[in-house]
Amino acid sequence: MNKKIGKALVVGAGISGIRSALDLAETGYSVTLIDRSPHLGGVLSQLDYQFPTDRCGMCKMLPLVNRDASSQYCLRKGLFHENIEILLSTEMNSLEGEPGHFQVKLKQKPTWIDPELCNGCGLCTEVCPVEVPDEFNAGLNHRKAIYLPVPHAIPNPYVIDFTACTRCGECEKICPTQAIGISQQERKKFKILVVDDELIVRDSLKEWLEEEGFSVDMAESGQEALDKLSANSYHLMLTDIKMP
Ligand code: SF4
Ligand code: SF4
């Protein structure tokens, strides 16, 4: 259905969320489906293989589909609907308003891997030196710090577990498509204070440093610099010597 009759937000992309999103989308709502995890399917994604044949089939047993080949949803085919926008690694930050007129702020965690550039080659996982218990298999095996959260799901972006990652940079070096941007993201956290009474010097330094990915703050006098230093923390200060 192309004609949209309103907007709806579905929080949680497990079986209930996917079913709700599909129903709303079919009715004509423009749906945003969010999940705090980096993959769709929730617990369903862990139940996909059936004993003893290893055939997939949970989708067909559950009330998600037509129980035939025209399934609306399958972990291996993905969830694609013109009225559904999927935002993974996303949480609701605030909710205001009343029924029929809510305003919601969403917060999406950076994955530091560009899904448009990642071709799924897996080289990053091969070189990653960090191993941790794999939640997908209930800790029975290990995964790397850069990994596929659900091996068979679509969409299926590689993600980095930053609680385990040591920032060694090996994955970034080997990635053939430059999809990984750890060092760029690390630079954003590096705060520099530029102190100079010449506007052109301050602006030029700010522009160059921001182009390189750093966060830049500016002060035009010694007193302003001292005020900023007492209110914020900086990793580096670049300052003129002769100051008003
Ligand atoms: S090496 Fe790069 S392109 Fe290959 S899976 Fe990892 S992030 Fe994707
Ligand atoms: S930067 Fe992190 S994810 Fe990448 S190889 Fe090193 S430990 Fe693994």
Image (tube, rainbow, N blue to C red):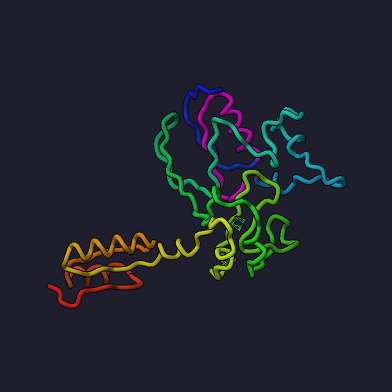
Residue 154's x, y, as percent? 65, 43
Q: Nearer the viewer, residue 24 or 68?
A: 68
Residue 234's x, y, as percent? 33, 70
Q: Please state the quadrant of the image where ligand 1 appears.
A: bottom right
Residue stretch in magenta? 15-41
**Left or right, 71 with reference to 234:** right
**Left or right, 220 with reference to 238:** left
User: Which residue is found at the position 53% from the left and 58% from the top?
Assistant: 180
Residue 134's x, y, as percent? 69, 60
User: Which residue is found at the position 55% from the left and 30% from the top?
Assistant: 82
Up the image or down, 76 lies above or below 204; here it is: above
Q: Is residue 164 something one can see in this rendering? A: no
Furthest residue in direction bottom, as rendered: 241
Residue 6 part of the magenta segment: no
**Left or right, 235 with reference to 173:** left
User: Which residue is found at the position 45% from the left and 62% from the top?
Assistant: 184
